[in-house]
Amino acid sequence: MLRAVDIIRKKRDGGKLTAEEIGFFVDGVVKGTVPDYQIAAWLMAVFFQGMDFEETTHLTRWMMESGEVLRFDLSGPVVDKHSTGGVGDKISLPLAPLLASLGMYVPMISGRALGHTGGTLDKLESIPGYNTRLNPEEMARVLREVGATIVGQTEKLVPADRKLYALRDVTATVESIPLIASSIMSKKLAEGLDALILDVKTGSGAFMREMDRARELARTMVEIGKGMGVKVRALLTDMDRPLGVMVGNALEVAESVEVLQGKGPEDVRELVVELAAHLYAMVGFGTLEEGRERAREHLDSGKAYAKWEAMVQAQGGDPEAVFREDFLAVNHVAVMESPADGYVVGMDTLRVGLAATVLGAGRAKAEDVVDPKVGLRVLRKTGDRVEKGEPVVEIRANDRNRLEEARRLLNKAYRFGEAPPPSRPLVLEVID
């Protein structure tokens, strides 16, 4: 007879858990037959002893099957993208409708802001009426009508992950790569996907700041996908600079709409096109270069924007709201200026994200309320030439005290020098 204490002891001592042992433990987590103190002990054992690919795949599968697994009867490939989180990372917003315009179906289940990174659901909820709480039947309807839907996790989807994640957060075991990978992949694979693209951030604004750790996480998730019969590819991307200009919920929606209309910042457009092209090739629609060409064409022609309008309307939102003056209205606007002539030679992107959080664009705690309109316009980034007194960041706030606290963080986030720094590409590596 299996017992939780024996499974904990085995992993504590460096043993390899079987599929049966992992399944027994996950089932006990969901049913409540394994108490929190034993779950915490097991999490710590995994944190220190790790798991190999086979164990991590078993954990992912059992977590995925702990609740409802979505299956959609659709006429094309079902795909999705996951990002490990970054500052100004609004890529999901233009990417999902772009993929739909290219003939893919995107049942994107996303999360909220916590810490220094933004949340896709918070961004979308800055659009009046947009409903992120769709059940599977409603998701299927929107997918059939539009091709893309972006929603929050339902209560029935991967319940084991909700329990384990909450305990990881309070037991200092969040940073375990097997636990991170199984958490991400169990939720994504529960969408019934044919292909998944992973955007794994590395740099000063990423959760995985070191390249080696980011690469290890990416490889783990790709191997899990292979083990479960789903095409998975990972792009390691730069987060030593914020993505785009806008950091904040309504601000990032407005910038996403610009990208969907063939404009917007070049780095956001580049990453959206690259992720779309990889999925285009992964599902067999054509080559990577053909995918890039088609993606650019659909952004420039308005085909992707038409899918955005249809998706927002199908989920109860008003796509015209972004064009109204009050969509971005705030009480206070200030700028941080360059202290000298020269170049921006480096940025602590974490501090930029924390500055936006201080303004109210994110959450320090899960129960914090987000202010949809506040945020930053990052006017100069690493490598940009600056002149003394030139605006570097525009701070948009509804509370003057918060504005000053954000300014102090931003002053510490920038480094200036006389010579430009070495350039760094946006896409650092591809893993498949």
Image: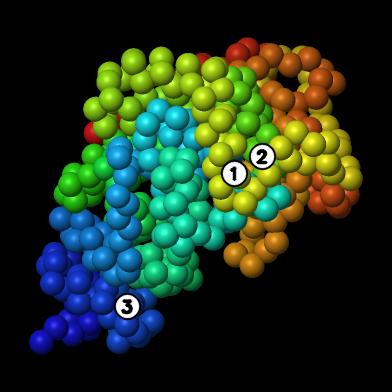
* Left-right relation of 404 to 76: right
Residue 367 percent coordinates (x, y): 64, 67
- Residue appearing at x 88%, y 42% in the figure: 332
Name the residue carrying label 2.
319
Q: Earlier in the sequence, mark 1 or mark 3?
A: 3
Name the residue carrying label 3.
29
Name the residue carrying label 1.
312
Q: Quadrant of the C terminus?
A: top left
Could you give the CA–CA distance between mark 2 and mark 1, rounded to whole angstroms?
6 Å
In front: 95, or 360? 95
Amino acid at circle 2: Pro
Could you give the CA–CA distance between mark 1 and mark 3, rounded to whole angstroms?
37 Å
Q: Earlier in the sequence, mark 3 or mark 2?
A: 3
Q: Residues within 10 Å of mark 2 (few under 14, many from 20)?
A: some
* Quarter location, residue 102: top left
Report helix, strand or loop for mark 1: helix
Q: Is residue 130 above or below residue 135?
A: above
